[in-house]
Image (cartoon, rainbow, N blue to C red):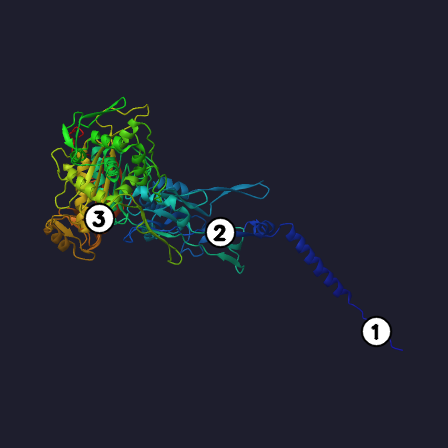
Amino acid sequence: MKKTRVIKINTIFIIIVVFIFATIIFKLLWIGLGNIKVNDKSLATFADNRDTRKKTLTAKRGTIYSSKGEVLAKDVNSYTVIAYLDSSRTKDEKRPYHVVDKEKTAERLSPLINMTKERILKLLNTKIKSCNEDKTECTERVPYQVELGPGGRGITELVKDQIEDLDLPGIDFIASTKRYYPNGDFLSYTLGYAKNNDNNQYIGEMGLELYYNDELTGTDGYIEYQSDLYGYQITSTPAVEQKSVSGDDIYLTIDDNIQMFTEQAMNTLEGGKPEWATISVVNAKTGEILGVSSSPSFNNNTLEIKSYYDPFVAYEYEPGSTMKIFSFMAAMENGIYDGSKKYKSGTIKVDEAKIKDWNNIGWGIVTFDNGFMASSNVAAVNLAMELGRAKLKDFYSSLGFGKKTGIPLPNESKGIVNFRYNTEVAAASYGQGMTASAIQMVQALTTIANDGIMIKPYIVSKIVSGETGEVVLENKRTEVAKVASTETVEKMKKLMRGVVQNGCKIATGGGYNVPGYDVIGKTGTAQIASSNGGYLKGSRNYIKSFAALFPGDDPQVIIYVAASKITDAKYLKNSVKTLVKDVGTYLNIVGNKEVEETGTYTTKSYINLDTTTVKSALEASSMEVIVIGDGNKIIKQYPKENTKLNAHNKIFLLTNDTNYKMINIKGWSRNDVSTFANMVGLDVNYDGYGYIKTYSIKEGTLLDKTSKLEVTLEPIFKEEVKNE
């Protein structure tokens, strides 16, 4: 029989074990009651605030480029200046990581962020109230950081670099992006703008930025992680990341140099103080829009917008006598036109209405060919009455009037082509009582350049994936329909040449003739409808327009200009003639006579060359040289390399100087001032139209990023001439 072994446990050992367990239980209860602190927070509070955070990774918005690859709209880095005030950031007094000298910091930052020293000091001395959990005790404490706004918000990379050079302890930056338009007031309505919404997303609100908002926006990503009480990721915890997908890039048909010429032409046109105006330059063979400008314009970066509707596509108006191109073509296509046949000009009665020629008396007995060149309303009405309502309306419809062209720009108008009565048919033959848009006029004019085939105008060349570089959309010449015969087109080109090149003594377009370029075209003057019925009275209450194609034998370029309530038709003529010469010289397009090459100059690359040498060479070539800064080397130029210019055009050269001074800009155009301002980073406010009369910054004044230039403009021609 086995004996049972008895193990005796020492009483002291039992007491020790019980004590240890009691201590552990007490500690757990003590912790659970919130007596452990993490910084100034209880462990319970800290644990409660441990959270899973999801941070949005905003997609890069697509870039918009010109046909030559120049950036027209892009995302750029933007920064907000912050100041760390909590001294706990600093572990080594020799290397402080918080603001130590507030006076010095405020004084040094003031000129760079355009805020007063006092305002910055007030922010740096900010105190916030801090209370315990039951709010029985409250004290004031220094916040961890403050934002130095508003001046420190949205600063550029350049200003950020300047602030970093100050080496101010405790000053840091929060990075973000903003939409930037490098050329300022340039192609404004077409580009439109994108604006940051409440969700920190850029949304297109106008122009291509609006129309292609989905393509440009891309897809946001996110990162998800475990965060502590202060929002920082907890070390060694996993993170889930979904990368963002960049928006698509858009390439336009716009040629930078032709756009510059178009903007300059608009500056000339604005001298006549139009209520609104539009100018477009189009490749007559392909339908590519090479340049387009509308007035009143705006700077896409500052958004001082007077109208949100683009006159080029959104305005519908009675086009006036440029429609005679198409009413005469309708007569030719239907076999009722005989240009040598004569009629009595002056007046014609249609039902109870008495319709007059624009000069009220006519030119006696004239041929229909001469009637077209003289822009005779009576000639157009005679043809329309013989043609009939249905055939005229059908021909207008075949040219796209009364429906949208489909150009990818917001708010396109379709116009109204809905005449029923004889008087309405008569009025429509000379462009009254119906409405059209400028883009519709351009589309219809392509028939003259393409043997009667109408070409669809377009402004987007291609769309490219921002991620893969793959072309996702590509546009090209699109034939809409053949609407007129070769015989009709050749006859119309001959008549339009007569309008401009004095095919008869009573032709209306001689003022638009540019020798050597074989310009053909048609003038237009339309009464403006009154909201109370009938038409407005007064010498300025007309829409003046001109449709030009060149060279006439085989048109390569279409220029269409329209301006409402302009003071003098001279501004219209000057803008068109200069534009024809600039575009023709640049594209090397000549007409039926050789254009003399003397008086033209093709730019070269002047980057990194000696300033004095380049300036002397350009002046010897009869160019006007604008040197910015006193540096010995050139770091930027405008226009760019291989641009063909007429003599005495301005060439801007930015030197490697560290300080730029204000120069004499009196008499400059708005476009020239914009070029200068963009090169030196200067903000400009414009008042008036035409050319610079006065400006606010004295010549020789040192410019910095806070400088603001105020300019007033006035037209060159002050005399008023009666409309033709």
Badge 2, how many Cα within 10 Å: few under 14, some, many 20+? few
In the rendered structure, which amino acid carries the disc numbered 2?
Lys
Task: Residue lying at the far right in this picture: please name it.
Answer: 1
What's the residue type where badge 3 is placed?
Answer: Gln
Query: Marks 2 and 3: in contact by CB < 8 Å?
Result: no
Which comes before the other along the chain, label 1 or label 3? 1
Residue 710 visible in this rendered orientation of the protein: no
Determine the CA span between mark 1 and mark 3.
Answer: 118 Å
Q: Nearer the viewer, residue 257 or 1?
A: 257
Q: Which residue is mark 1?
A: 5
Viewer-closest of 587 and 592: 592
Q: Say what secondary structure mark 2 lies in.
A: strand
Q: Which of the two residues, 494 or 605, is positioned nearer the viewer here?
A: 494
Q: Are marks 1 and 3 in contact (CB under 8 Å)?
A: no
**Front tag of 2 and 1:** 2
Residue highlighted by disc 3: 556
Q: Are marks 2 and 1 in contact (CB under 8 Å)?
A: no
Q: Which residue is depicted at the point 11% across and 52% down?
A: 616
Give residue 508's position: percent from left, percent from top.
16, 34
At mark 3, the secondary structure is loop
Residue 644: percent from left, percent from top: 17, 51
Distance from the alpha carbon under mark 3 to that under mark 2: 53 Å
Quarter in which the C terminus is drawn: top left
Question: At which x and y percent is residue 318?
Answer: 28, 32
